[in-house]
Amino acid sequence: MPIGELCSREVVFVRREDSIREAAQLMRQHHVGDVLVVDEKDAQRVPVGIVTDRDIVVEVVAKNVDLDVVTVGDIMSFQLVSARDTDGVYETIQLMRIKGVRRLPIVNARGGLVGILALDDIIELLAEELSALAKVIAREQAQEKKKKV
């Protein structure tokens, strides 16, 4: 299955010049733990960074930084890891493991933002698949019991 079919298409995003307060308010409003930072290029949004709720706490709140002085671009993670929408699930899991990331922007062939994938999305998919396998085992056992009677 291409990862583009699994990712969430509803992405909360900001621009580099947006304030930390705006980013935090968007996270609260949309009940998410991160916002993607995007630039507009060739009529599409291109992810260039990410800011998490933890980034805001560690880099701004804990250091007592004035919220009106810094922007999202000042604290965003610059080494953004992304996956192509055509990449497979296993390949994407390996990328997340190797890079140590829990959230991954999904982009198209031109680098435009398609969606975002969270570790939770993959765990949910795997749980559904394991549940289906468990039902196969239960059904097989039930059929064996019928044959013995």
Image (cartoon, grey):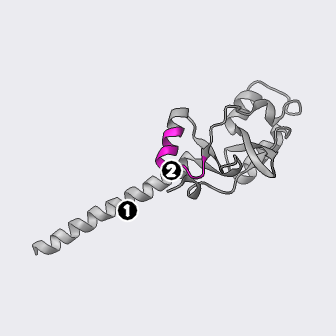
The correct choice, above or below, for 130 with respect to 92 in the image is below
Name which residue type carries label 2: Gly
The percent position of residue 105, horizontal first and vertical second, equals 65, 45
Spatial CA span between label 2 and label 1: 20 Å
Lateral position of residue 70 relative to residue 55, left or right: right
Q: Earlier in the sequence, mark 2 or mark 1?
A: 2
Image-quadrant location for residue 83: top right
> Residue 110 versus residue 99: which sits nearer the camera?
110
Residue at horizontal 41%, vertical 58%?
129
The percent position of residue 12, horizontal first and vertical second, equals 73, 50
Q: Which residues are magenta?
A: 84-95
Lateral position of residue 116 relative to residue 95, left or right: right
Look at the image and say whether residue 86 sits in the magenta stretch. Answer: yes
Name which residue type carries label 1: Ala
Residue at horizontal 49%, vertical 54%?
124
Find disc 1 in the rendering and name its residue.
132
Residue at horizontal 53%, vertical 39%?
95
Find disc 2 in the rendering and name its residue.
88
The correct choice, above or below, for 53 with respect to 63 in the image is below
Please, what secondary structure does the residue beneath circle 1 have? Answer: helix
Name the outermost residue toward the left: 148
Image-quadrant location for residue 141: bottom left
Circle 1 packing at 10 Å, graded few (<14), some (14-19), many (20+), is few
The percent position of residue 100, horizontal first and vertical second, equals 55, 34
